[in-house]
Amino acid sequence: MKSYIGKITDDRHMSCSRLIGLTGLSHWSTPNDELRKSIDAIDRGTAHAPGNYVSSEAADWGNWNEGNILAVTADRLSLEQPELEVTEPVIHKTLPLQGSLDGRADGASLTFTTDTDAGIYVIGQDEICLDGMGVLEAKSTRHAPEIEPDIGRGPLQVQGLMMCTGYQWAAIGVLYQGSELRIFLYAPDQAQRYKISADVQDFQTRLDLYRTQSVTDWYPALTPNDAALTWPTAEPEQSLTLSTELSDRVSELHAAKRARRAIEDQIAGLTSEIQSEMGCHETAYAQENGENFARVSWRMSRGRKAYAVEAKPPTRAKSLVIKILDD
């Protein structure tokens, strides 16, 4: 079994696994989160925080399965000289970007087209020649099989790894629901490379500003939660005059909130009106031209049995469930 190597890239620099957060495409991380992570590492003066790996059963199974995923991927593609334990980071020659390879192998100049029976999918082109050494990436997910992996399952990461290594192909082996392996083959994507280069250079400029002047140039927040984490305190005595453009945004936000409040009031009024008519009935039908077109349900909650906490009796829901009936 392949041993778990752990993190080998330096948090004080951008790494390929973090590109998805940097580009704002992650469900779990924002550009500001990535900037904060590197700034914290700079302040610590260490590559990464001790014990920063957070274990979970899903993550542990992914690590335990990694060697098998890589081995089967290499075997299914008939790759030569597979190296499935890479213990040193790969570092871009000119760009402040580094990455860690799950594995690498020689493609033996084999050419592939999409073969769904073999679980092999060529992404972005009709065929691909695995010329020379290439990137091997292993992923494991509980999601259903895809014909193209979600951006969070390696596509952007392997583009960065190809940039760092100079390799001209990458294979992502994704084990779906523990029972189906699909292999996705990629060639370098020039448009993605341009964006990665621009984003990494901009990220480095912000880090350099912090190193030299202790000034943090945050990214625009992607969500209200991102904004609250990025600017966690307020100075009551300070005020700001907004630009004309953002003043217009204030008007739009105020109008949107008023519209939402009006809609919420309308929903509450219509709901209570229908509930008053339904009384103790759980189900009602709405008609149009003498035909039922919708079923309205006003259900009871499940309640809660008395175990370690006090029992809770069932209560009536405060909202209605409306299902439009099929013709």
Image (tube, rainbow, N blue to C red):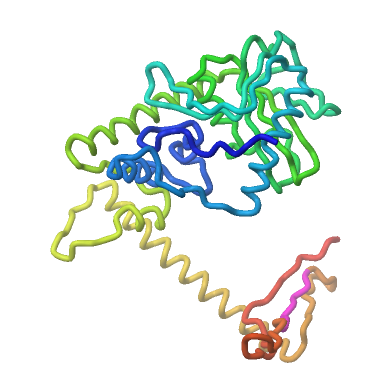
Q: Quadrant of residue 67?
A: top right
| Residue beneath the point at 45% across and 36% down | 23
Asked whether 281 falls inside the magenta stretch, the response is no
Give the total of numbered labels.
0
| Stretch in magenta | 294-300
298 part of magenta stretch: yes
**Vertical placement of 109 versus 246: above or below?**
above
* Above-or-below relation of 224 to 22: below
Seen in the image, is 189 located left or right of residue 143? Answer: left
Identity of the residue drawn at 35% across and 42% down: 35
Residue 63 percent across, percent down from the top left: 64, 42
Q: Please provide percent x and percent y for residue 159.
A: 54, 25
| Quarter of the image where the N terminus is located | top right
Q: Measured from the top left, where is residue 152 in percent x and y?
A: 58, 39
Comparing 300 with 287, the one in front is 300
Q: Nearer the viewer, residue 232 or 5?
A: 5
Residue nearest the viewer, comparing 306 with 315: 306
- The picture quadrant where one finds residue 124 is top right
- Determine whether, in the image, residue 325 is placed left or right of residue 307: right
**Which residue occupies 19% across, 42% down?**
214
Residue drawn 77% across the image and 23% down it: 75
Residue 285, x across and y down, in percent: 79, 77
Which quadrant of the structure image shows residue 39? top left
Outermost residue on the left side: it is 237
Which part of the image, by quadrant, shows the C terminus? bottom right
Q: Is residue 63 left or right of residue 20?
A: right
Q: Is residue 25 left or right of residue 103?
A: left
